[in-house]
Amino acid sequence: MKDYIITAENIQLLVNDVLKQGWDVVSESKTGVNFNAIKDASELAIKSDSKPSKLSMKDFFFPKTEPLFFYRQSHDGVELVDASPIEKKTLFLGAKPCDAAAIPVLSKVFNWDYKDEFYNKRVENSVVVSLKCNYSDDYCFCTSIGLSQKAEQGSDAMLTEQQDGSYFLHIVTEKGDEFFKMYSQYLKDTQAENNKPVESKYPEPAVKFDQGKVKGWLDANFEHDFWNNLGDVCLGCGQCTFVCPTCHCFDIVDENCNYHEGGRMKNWDSCQLCLFTKHASGHNPRDGQTKRYRQRIQHKFKYYEDKFNEVLCTGCGRCTRGCGVGIDIGGIMERIDKF
Amino acid sequence: MENIYKPDLAEVKEIIDETADTRTLRLQFKDPEVHKAFSFKAGQFGEYSVFGEGECTFCIASPPTRMEYIECTFKLVGKVTNALRKLNVGDTIGLRGPYGNSFPLEQMKGKNIVFISGGIGLAPVRCITWNVLDLRNEFKDITIVYGARRVEDLVYKNELEQWKAMKDVKTYITVDPGGETPDWKGEVGFVPSIVEKVAPSGENSIAIICGPPIMIKFTMPVLQKLGFKEENIITTLENRMKCGLGKCGRCNVGNVYVCKDGPVFNYTQMKALPDEY
């Protein structure tokens, strides 16, 4: 696919133009907390050497809460009303590769056999332009799970910050190509050899493990003392699953507006919460934090791979950075690797 | 946009109280076309909903050979079953499905079948039992063993009588010692010991078993002693579910999703599961 150069000023102009076309533009917020739909290009925060935001951008594809349909009850029975169609086009600008890579990973679970069109429509309506990452800290480990700071999975195009302050734009997909053709006035044609990226101030992620070896150990050690230690530390608060770009467990609940009307909602849920698997009878298959933490690790690094040939993780390190008691998932992987 | 989470509307046509806390609803889809198009296999389950209260997962308790009504049987335990319990004839509920795999009916043909169940575990077994009985000529000897703690805990009492009256079916209804009433004419004793007395040999036989874990635990060695091969002992598992579609992430046991890979498993498959169900 094609390569272009785009200046920082032209990115601003392009964004305002895209906004004018009625699109949403989503970028990391300047506070570094989450991703935001911006109203003006001046709110853009494109920084290749920033820490990943506290929350991932999965919220824009798989919202914290969304109506599946509405119901209205009367003496004549029940009427079901569809939720409003998902039509808004969205440009994601400056996502880290570890954020963009979550999209195709989640597509697998939302599309095996039954298709979740709520998720699919949002992916279909989006153009994801990621930014080559120049950051790493003690918690990043994208390089251990088959990704890298310039991985293109899930991106329609990728920006690379250049030594002269401009950006090298590499088109990854047809969709990305179509999109940038509409805004060619802001781009300058170039060739791959003109890509002169800025040097990263940070070394490659220090956490290193062999996912194949970890998977082998997980296959054989559903029961192991190792899990007990983790379960003893974990508070079961669920933050790791909420900040994660790939965690996708959800609940389906009815939320009433009044006695007659309401909506059936799909809400984020977490395998770390104690009621998650509890039966109405009182029986709970995962009745302790040890079992619940084991489920999280096994699901990410074994079950998902068994089913979909992908690890349910992009190595962004958010779960570790946010953990109140310092449970370090990269460190856990390294320890498993050494068993 | 196709919406896999949106149920079809069904009407409660009849309510049958099985025990003090267990009830059967007979349902028909409101749209006759939907009802006509609805098909399922014995062992599959549905998501039943009371709007404003939420959804609940139960097996379809009526057999696919009798499609006039779709039936579910549930025990009053939680929020949604409480709401289902308040419904009257003519009220509307939501139903989506069928989901999951089913009992291996084709593989069961030409064999002796023994149905073993306890308590409300009869609901899925009742579905496959009627399915088999409605195609009676295609199976060899049929034995039914059903038990409950007390006489008043037996579900589908009318149908138990019908099965007992059938000449080509051996039916044994039992209650736990102490659970009998003065006029009780059935067996007294635990399910595993009744199975030991009346089940056919495992040669060319298939056992369908569903009930409390303790019943299954003590019946397994009996079946193995009778020579049942592990792959011919078939059960149906339940776990908390929300979507029923393999997405919401809570019913998995190891890498197996009960809602998609199950709920029907044979004993070989069960033994391969990690101990987390």
Image (cartoon, coloured by chain):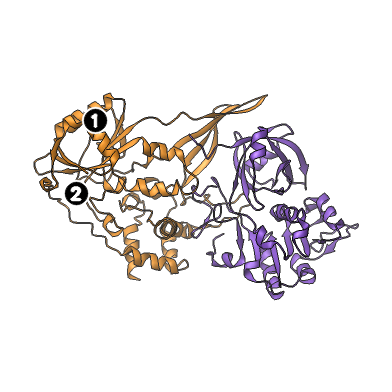
> Which residue bears the numbered disc 1?
A182
Q: Position of residue A122 (x, y in %)?
A: 39, 37
Residue drawn at 47 percent across, 41 percent down: A116
Task: Decide: few, some or many residues near mark 2? Use Cα within 10 Å; few <14, some 14-19, many ≥20.
Answer: many
Which chain is drawn using orange?
A: A
Q: In terms of depth relative to the viewer, which is nearer, A176 or A31? A: A176
Marks 1 and 2 on same chain = yes
Judge left or right: residue A129 versus residue A277: left
Question: In which quarter of the view is residue B125 placed?
Answer: bottom right
> Which residue bears the numbered disc 2?
A134
Judge left or right: residue B136 versus residue B74: right
Please name the amino acid that badge 2 sits on: Asn
**What SS does tag 2 mark?**
loop
Judge left or right: residue A39 versus residue A108: left
Looking at the image, residue A114 lies above or below residue A145: above
Task: Decide: few, some or many residues near mark 1? Use Cα within 10 Å; few <14, some 14-19, many ≥20.
Answer: few
Disc 1/disc 2 C-alpha distance (Å): 29 Å
Looking at the image, residue A110 lies above or below residue A207: above
Question: In which quarter of the view is residue B237 placed?
Answer: bottom right
Residue drawn at 35 percent across, 71 percent down: A339
Question: In which quarter of the view is residue A146 placed?
Answer: bottom left
Q: Chain of mark 1?
A: A
Mark seen at residue B162: none
Q: In terms of depth relative to the viewer, which is nearer, B12 or A4? A: A4
Q: Chain of mark 2?
A: A
Please name the amino acid that badge 1 sits on: Met
Q: Colour of chain B?
A: purple
